[in-house]
Image (cartoon, grey):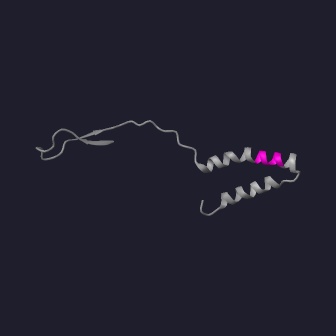
Amino acid sequence: MTHNIIGNEAGRPTAHVTIREMRHRRRRPRISLVVAAHLATLPIGGAAAAIDGLIIGQPVCFTALVLAYLAWCFWPSR
């Protein structure tokens, strides 16, 4: 809703106010950083597991990613 004073208001004792209802298009909400991070975990974890399984033979990368992700999830300042 907007309030617009129209015309010359100098000679009037009170201002003439027109109230107009404006329709706004709803914007699609942007995806938050938290949701994006959770969605990115599946392909990143899959790539780390593939690297571990094919190249290293031990779950080194996957374990490091899981620990970093858990630290990010439970970090108090986030």
Q: Position of residue 74 (x, y in %)?
A: 66, 60
Q: Residue at x 33, y 42 (%)?
A: 1
Q: Residue at x 73, y 44 (%)?
A: 43
Taking the magenta stretch, the answer to whether it contains residue 50 is yes
Q: Residue at x 78, y 45 (%)?
A: 47
Q: Is residue 41 left or right of residue 17?
A: right
- Number of numbered markers: 0
Per the rendered image, the range of residues in magenta is 45-51
Q: Main secondary structure of the magenta part?
A: helix
Say which of 38 and 53 sits in front.
53
Q: Position of residue 71 (x, y in %)?
A: 69, 60
Say which of 78 and 3 sits in front.
78
Q: Residue at x 18, y 45 (%)?
A: 15
Q: Quadrant of residue 23?
A: top left
Look at the picture and state if 2 lies above or below 63.
above
Q: Position of residue 70 (x, y in %)?
A: 71, 58
Q: Which residue is outermost to the front?
A: 55
Taking the magenta stretch, the answer to whether it contains residue 30 is no
Look at the picture and state if 50 lies above or below 74.
above
Q: Is residue 74 left or right of residue 11?
A: right
> Which quadrant of the rendered structure holds the C terminus?
bottom right
Q: Which residue is outermost to the left?
A: 11
Q: Quadrant of residue 66?
A: bottom right
Q: Which residue is outermost to the right?
A: 57
